[in-house]
Image (cartoon, grey):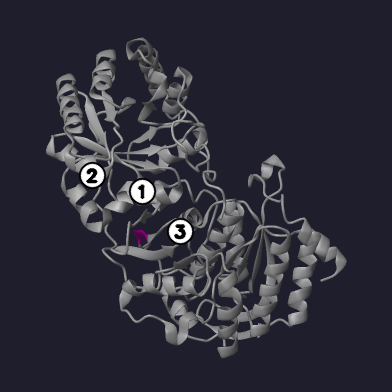
Amino acid sequence: MNARAEAGVARAAGHAGDPDADTGAPRPVVWSIAGTDSGGGAGLGADQRAADAFGVHLCPVVAAVTAQHSRAVTQVEPVPEALLEAQLAALAEDMPPRAVKTGLLGSAGHVRAVARWIDRLRAAAPVALVVDPVLAATSGRAFADADTLAAYREELLPRASVVTPNRREAALLLGAGAPEAAGHESAPAWARALRRQGARAVAVTGGDGADVEGRVLDWIDTPQAAGWLAGPRIDTPHRHGTGCTFASGLAAALALGFVSADAAVLARMATAHALRRAYAAGRGPGPVCAGAGFAAPAAELPLLSWGEAPRFAPAAPPPTRPLGLYAIVDSAERVRQVLSAGVRTVQLRIKAAEDTEATPALEAAVRDSVAACRAAGAELFVNDHWRLAQRLGAPGVHLGQEDLLALGEADRAALLDAGLALGVSTHSLWELARSRALAPRYLACGPVWPTLTKAMPWRPQGLDNLAWWCAMAGVPVVAIGGLLEARHFEAAMRAGADGACAVRVLGEDPERRVPALLQAVAAGRAARGDGPVPPLPHPSLAAD
């Protein structure tokens, strides 16, 4: 690497910006090291469409030239290694990446060259690596010999931020070590095996597999979450470039600062949107067409399972009343105070160890709160203690993500069977997708503003993410976190929230504070939805 290239690598930090080109801010740079497709369906052409959809700048690095059309690949020619090196060195001088995505690599030498460049780039600044192991054409033609497969295992997997094989590619990567299983059930084991080989995260795509209850399943295994990303199969014969679109979308999302689980959700949405926009361009399967606005249709937001069983609750009937001002209190006495002040949605949050769930004091607080809310015609949610809530006749419960995960499959099924209205906390895209799988009464989006109520790693959502949540969730959304003044409640309702949570703002005398909050909630509801919904949410957690 020459001196100018070294200097370019050193400038890798600080290149992220607003993806909206109209702002004049720099777009995050993504390198795609892949093959050309003379038919325009897959490879670098599909990568470019995905990058444009996300608003990042793609640098197309040619690793191989293919002769192909919509029905077959007739020839593949890897570029000379010196030419691949020259392309990468030129880019490093002036356009260092936030993320690198690999597609078709023509030789083991190419794989080793990419690995060396990833190390050079990372010596200067964080760089995500998405490995899309294009090992064979759909027609069955092999693109990777034994040496290339070995180089993938030894060089790229240990450096991969995310690897995105389909089922056949996962088995090829693992070789003789591939776990044996049939159908979709193999994907979790394959993903675990690939992570053991060094990949930080894995997404085993399922478009080439059989549907499960009418859904296409992709298995993700990331530092944040593992589960099935699920959505309906889109009925089109035109699927050329689907894997490239998913991997490039994931790389673009990582370049924008999303963690890998959130990036996988966005990549899945972009791929679904691309399939809906696919078209014929020859006598065989045509290209998918990623485009701007992919994260706006609520239908594209996938579900995420809570475990290896692809279980998703049926949609709940629409609620009959808005949640409005939602008071969170810690005693039955406070429940009575906020009810007297006019609140009609209450959460009783009494933190207690699981083994103290049946103490007389806790039971009395829940029993008294149930009676008080029933008499006032108010909706009550008991935080955490769902079995106690069920036994004492509470209509609803609220649980956090960690609490729901800790329940396990059997207890989550029992919770859903109990018929309790369920509220779930969400802070990120994967938590939103996972919570929707339970068909909840509502989802809480937070923290909307900075909050000191509890320590958490999440960045404030702001009104922009709140508006996106409200447009995409498919169920009522409650704003929570940092709502300290009446204007916060009005703004949250204007953004589309069905309810807004009051905690500290209630003060010692709710009778004095609540009327202004109710007025703000009503004013915001009257103007609900009059603000813009962003085309993409912003990241709510620091990148991997």
Crowd around label 3: few <14 · some 14–19 · many ≥20 (10 Å): many
Q: Which residues are magenta?
A: 228-232
Mark 3 vs mark 2, CA separation in Å: 41 Å
**Residue 91 in which image quadrant:** bottom right
First along the sequence among labels 2 and 1: 2
Q: Circle 1 is placed at which residue position?
A: 402
Asked if residue 139 can be seen in this view, the reply is: no
Q: Which mark is residue 268?
A: 3
Q: Is residue 369 left or right of residue 225?
A: left
Q: Residue at x 45, y 46 (%)?
A: 428
Q: Secondary structure at mark 2?
A: helix
The N terminus sits in image quarter: bottom right
In percent of width and height, residue 171 lies at: 44, 81
Q: Is residue 24 above or below residue 290?
A: above
Residue at 36 percent across and 51 percent down: it is 434
Indicate the position of residue 17 as horizontal and vertical percent values: 67, 46
Secondary element at image label 3: helix
Mark toward the start of the polypeptide (3 vs 1): 3
Residue shown at 35%/75% (left/top)? Answer: 186
* Residue indicated by mark 2: 355
The foreground one among 131 and 22 is 131
Q: Nearer the viewer, residue 406 or 277?
A: 406
Instruction: Report whether residue 193 is seen.
Output: yes
Q: Looking at the picture, which amino acid does disc 2 mark? A: Asp
Give yes or no for contact between labels 3 and 1 (Cβ–Cβ under 8 Å): no
Looking at the image, which is closer to me, 264 or 52?
264
